[in-house]
Image (cartoon, rainbow, N blue to C red):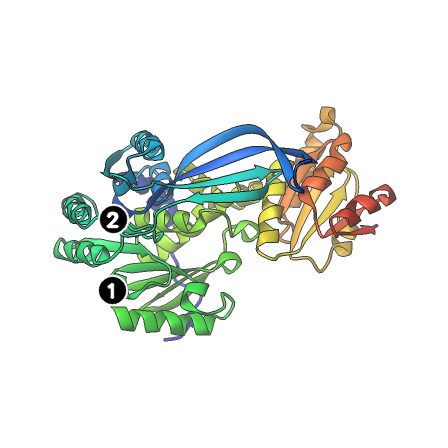
C-alpha cells in the first residue's frame, strides 16, 4: 500500500482526551524479571594495583528491570496491572518481590523456582558514563511444572484485563511453548496480545502487535521502504495484526493492513534512552487498553519516549508529562537540563555513534557564530555561563527559553563560570566552540576533541 505520512492522525485535542483515560486501563504483563542495580560515584584516580579507574561510591539504586520496567512505566501512567514472572529463592528474588509489591495498582504473581539464580544487572556509573556492567543470570527455561502454573495463572488474569504484554528478555520465563499457550488463551478470551520479543517472530505467531527495532527486521532505520517490506513479510508469515518499529532517532513506524505510518520523535535530540523499548511497549499497551486506535497509541508512545529520555537514568513518564508534551512550550522545556543530565545525554549519544558539539554563550551574546563554528556535528549542547546570583534573572530565563525553542539545539544547560572546566570534562564534546578559550585547548585535545574559537 506504500508509505503514509501523519495525515489523518489523531489531533492533539483527541490525545488530550485519551491520556487521562490511561489511568483506567487494565494490562497483564508476563515476562522476564530482573534486578537492575546502579552504583553511582566519582573517579578521581587510577588504581595503583592495575590500570583501572577507582570509583568512589556515592549512592546505589535498585529497580525492577526487564518486564519489571514495563510494569514501572505502566503504573506511572496510572494503569492497573497484573504481573506474572519467576524469580529464584535468593536475596535478589526477595528484593524484587518487595519492589514489585510496592508498585501501585499491581496484582503480583511472582513464582519462585528453587535453586534458580535471579537475574541481576549491575552498572557502575561516573559523570554520566557507564564504566562497567556485570550480569548474574540463568537463561535456561523455567521448570516445566512452573511453566504450566504460569500459563494457568495468565489464562485467568488476562480475562480481567484488556491487553496482555509478553516481555521476552530471553531469560527463560517465555521459553518453549509458553508464548503460544498464552496467545491461544488470549484469543479464546477475545483479548489482545502485544509482544516485545526482538527478532524471534515465529514463537509469537498470532500476536496482535509486535514491537521491534529496525535491526530486528534486518534493515536500516532510515530505509523506510525496506522497513515496510520487512514488516509486511513478518505480518504475512506469522499472522501479526501490526508491527510497530522503534526507529531511535528516526521515530516510530506503524505497519499494518492500512499501510505504513511514520512519526518523528517528539524530542529528536532525546529519541534513544535506556529502557526505551519498555517505555514504548507500556505506552502502547495502556493506550490500546484505554480504547485507542493504533495511530493514536503510537503518538502517545512517542510522547512517552520523549519524556522518559529527558530524565536521568531509567525514567518513566506520567500522564501530566504527556499532556505537557502536547504544547510547543512543554517540548522545548524538556531541552533545558542540569549539566549532569546533559553529560548523561552526551554519553548516550557517543554510545550511538553520534558526534556532539558544545557552544558556550553569555547572556548578552549572539549564539549564531558559535553554532556556525560547531556545524557538522549531529547533536548540539548550548551552555549558558552565568554567575549564580543571576541564574534566575528574567534575561537568563528568556535566553534559555529562546535557545530551547531552536530546532538546531538539542540540549541547554546553565552553569557558573567556575564550573566551566568540570562541565566540559563531563560532557567531552567532539567540538567545543567558545569566544575565548585558548586555555582550554589542551583539555579538549585530551579527550580527542577540537576547539573552535569564535
Out of 234 and 54, give the one closest to the viewer: 54
Dot placed on the residue nearer the N-terminal end, 1 or 2:
2
Q: Which label lies toward us, 1 or 2?
A: 2
Q: What is the x, y in percent for residue 287?
A: 32, 48
Compared with 56, 360 (above or below) is: below
Horizontally, residue 356 falls left or right of residue 215, namely right
Quadrant of res 76 = top left
Q: What is the x, y in percent for residue 142?
A: 25, 48
Mark 2 Cα-neighbour bin, 10 Å: few <14, some 14–19, many ≥20? many
Quadrant of res 161 = top left
Helix, strand, or loop for circle 1?
loop
Where residue 44 is drawn, which disc sits there? none
Compared with 220, 76 (above or below) is: above
Q: Which residue is mark 2?
A: 142
Evaluate whether residue 335 shows in this view.
no
Out of 204 and 211, give the one closest to the viewer: 204
Evaluate whether residue 334 shows in this view.
yes
> Residue at left 50%, top 54%?
265
Compared with 97, 327 (above or below) is: below
Helix, strand, or loop for circle 2?
loop
Q: Which residue is mark 1?
A: 205
Out of 442 and 73, give the one closest to the viewer: 442
> Residue at left 70%, top 46%?
428
Amino acid at each position: 500500500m506504500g508509505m503514509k505520512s501523519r495525515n489523518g492522525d489523531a489531533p492533539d485535542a483527541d490525545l488530550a482526551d485519551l491520556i487521562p483515560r490511561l489511568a483506567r486501563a487494565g494490562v497483564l504483563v508476563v515476562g522476564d524479571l530482573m534486578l537492575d542495580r546502579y552504583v553511582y560515584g566519582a573517579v578521581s584516580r587510577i588504581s595503583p594495583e592495575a590500570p583501572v579507574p577507582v570509583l568512589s561510591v556515592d549512592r546505589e539504586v535498585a529497580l525492577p528491570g526487564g518486564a519489571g520496567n514495563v510494569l514501572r512505566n505502566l503504573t506511572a501512567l496510572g494503569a492497573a496491572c497484573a504481573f506474572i514472572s519467576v524469580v529464584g529463592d535468593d536475596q535478589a528474588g526477595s528484593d524484587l518481590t518487595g519492589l514489585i509489591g510496592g508498585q501501585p495498582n499491581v496484582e503480583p504473581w511472582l513464582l519462585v523456582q528453587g535453586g534458580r539464580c535471579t537475574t541481576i544487572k549491575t552498572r557502575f556509573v561516573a559523570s554520566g558514563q557507564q564504566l562497567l556492567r556485570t550480569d548474574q543470570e540463568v537463561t535456561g527455561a523455567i521448570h516445566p511444572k512452573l511453566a504450566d502454573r504460569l500459563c494457568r495463572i495468565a489464562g485467568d488474569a488476562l480475562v480481567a484485563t484488556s491487553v496482555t504484554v509478553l516481555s521476552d528478555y530471553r531469560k527463560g520465563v517465555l521459553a518453549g511453548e509458553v508464548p503460544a499457550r498464552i496467545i491461544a488463551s488470549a484469543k479464546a478470551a477475545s483479548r489482545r496480545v502485544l509482544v516485545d520479543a526482538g527478532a524471534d517472530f515465529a514463537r509469537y505467531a498470532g500476536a496482535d502487535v509486535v514491537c521491534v527495532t529496525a535491526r530486528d527486521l534486518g534493515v536500516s532505520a532510515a530505509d523506510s521502504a525496506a522497513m515496510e517490506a520487512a514488516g509486511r513479510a513478518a505480518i504475512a508469515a506469522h499472522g501479526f495484526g501490526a508491527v510497530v518499529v522503534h526507529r531511535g532517532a528516526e521515530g516510530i513506524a506503524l505497519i499494518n493492513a492500512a499501510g505504513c505510518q511514520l512519526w518523528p520523535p517528539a524530542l529528536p535530540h532525546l529519541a534513544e534512552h535506556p529502557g526505551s523499548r519498555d517505555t514504548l511497549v507500556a505506552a502502547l499497551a495502556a493506550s490500546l487498553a484505554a480504547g485507542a486506535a493504533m495511530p493514536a497509541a503510537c503518538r502517545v508512545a512517542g510522547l512517552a519516549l520523549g519524556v522518559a529520555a529527558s530524565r536521568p537514568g531509567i525514567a518513566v513518564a506520567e500522564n501530566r508529562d504527556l499532556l505537557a508534551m502536547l504544547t510547543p512550550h512543554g517540548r522545548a522545556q524538556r531541552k533545558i537540563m542540569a549539566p549532569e543530565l546533559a553529560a548523561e545525554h552526551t554519553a548516550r549519544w557517543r554510545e550511538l555513534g553520534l558526534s556532539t558539539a558544545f557552544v558556550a554563550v553569555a547572556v548578552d551574546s549572539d549564539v549564531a557564530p558559535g553554532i556556525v563554528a560547531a556545524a557538522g556535528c549531529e547533536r548540539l549542547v548550548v551552555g549558558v555561563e552565568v554567575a549564580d546570583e543571576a541564574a534566575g534573572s528574567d534575561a537568563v530565563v528568556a535566553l534559555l527559553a529562546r535557545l530551547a525553542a531552536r530546532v538546531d539545539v538539542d540540549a541547554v544547560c546553565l552553569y557558573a563560570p567556575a564550573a566551566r572546566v568540570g562541565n566540559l570534562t563531563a560532557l567531552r564534546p567532539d567540538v567545543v566552540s567558545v569566544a575565548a578559550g585558548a586555555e582550554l585547548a589542551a583539555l579538549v585535545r585530551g579527550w580527542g576533541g577540537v576547539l573552535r574559537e569564535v
